[in-house]
Amino acid sequence: KPIPANFCGPVDHSLLGKYKTFVNPSTSEVLCTTTFEALAMGKFVIIPVHESNKFFLQFPNCLGYRNKWEFAANLRWALTHEPEPLTPELAKEFTWEAATDRLIRSSAITRREAKERYNLGKAKLDERIAYFHRELGKHDSIR
């Protein structure tokens, strides 16, 4: 049975001012950029409570659900309320600086982990991967 929705195709997100709710029900597609943009624009975002969405659940306009009843309740809430304005602290989470900090934190390993990788023979693989990425970065046509 078709759902009562209109899919407009590609639209510049700055033209979507009248919309206040973004729904992303997927747990397998890589749509986190659209979720991120919707939150940064001050929209409600309705997403499943899932490991891949953990970062977004810290925002007050992010409405996570675990089942169809929670989804329906969150949708009703979003349709009958206005999103909260972003605080300066939360707005900072949408900057490149904050994204870089998250990348560095997530990619760091402890000395113990480094030693384990060395003992397992994975340090050499790490060195080869780092070399490959450095070489790729030297060529503008590849970037």
Image: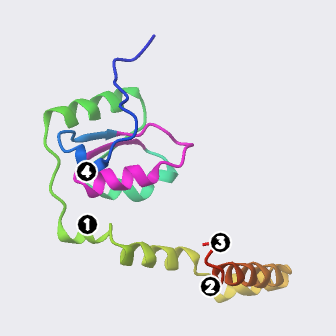
40 falls in the magenta region = yes
Query: According to the image, label 4 marks what residue?
Result: 14
Amino acid under label 2? Thr
Query: According to the image, label 2 marks what residue?
Result: 110
Dot 3 or dot 2, earlier in sequence = 2
Q: Which of labels 2 and 1 is toward the front?
A: 1
Q: Quadrant of residue 23?
A: top left
Q: Which of labels 1 and 4 is toward the front?
A: 4
Residue in view at x 62 percent, y 85 percent: 110
Q: How far apart are the two marked residues, 4 and 2, measured between alpha carbons?
A: 42 Å
Q: How far apart are the two marked residues, 2 and 1, measured between alpha carbons?
A: 28 Å
Q: Position of residue 136 (x, y in %)?
A: 69, 78
Dot 4 or dot 2, earlier in sequence = 4
Q: How far apart are the two marked residues, 3 and 1, measured between alpha carbons?
A: 34 Å
Amino acid under label 4? Ser
Residue 60 left/right relative to 125: left
Dot 4 or dot 3, earlier in sequence = 4
| Circle on res. 90 | 1
Q: Position of residue 30 (x, y in %)?
A: 53, 49
Q: Secondary structure at mark 3?
A: loop
Amino acid under label 1? Leu
Q: Which of labels 4 and 3 is toward the front?
A: 3
Q: Which of labels 3 and 1 is toward the front?
A: 3
Mark 1 neighbour density, 10 Å: few (under 14) some (14–19) many (20 or more): some
Q: Secondary structure at mark 1?
A: helix
Query: According to the image, label 3 marks what residue?
Result: 142
Q: Locate the C terminus by quadrant.
A: bottom right
Q: How far apart are the two marked residues, 4 and 3, measured between alpha carbons?
A: 30 Å
Q: Disc 3, disc 1: CB below 8 Å?
A: no
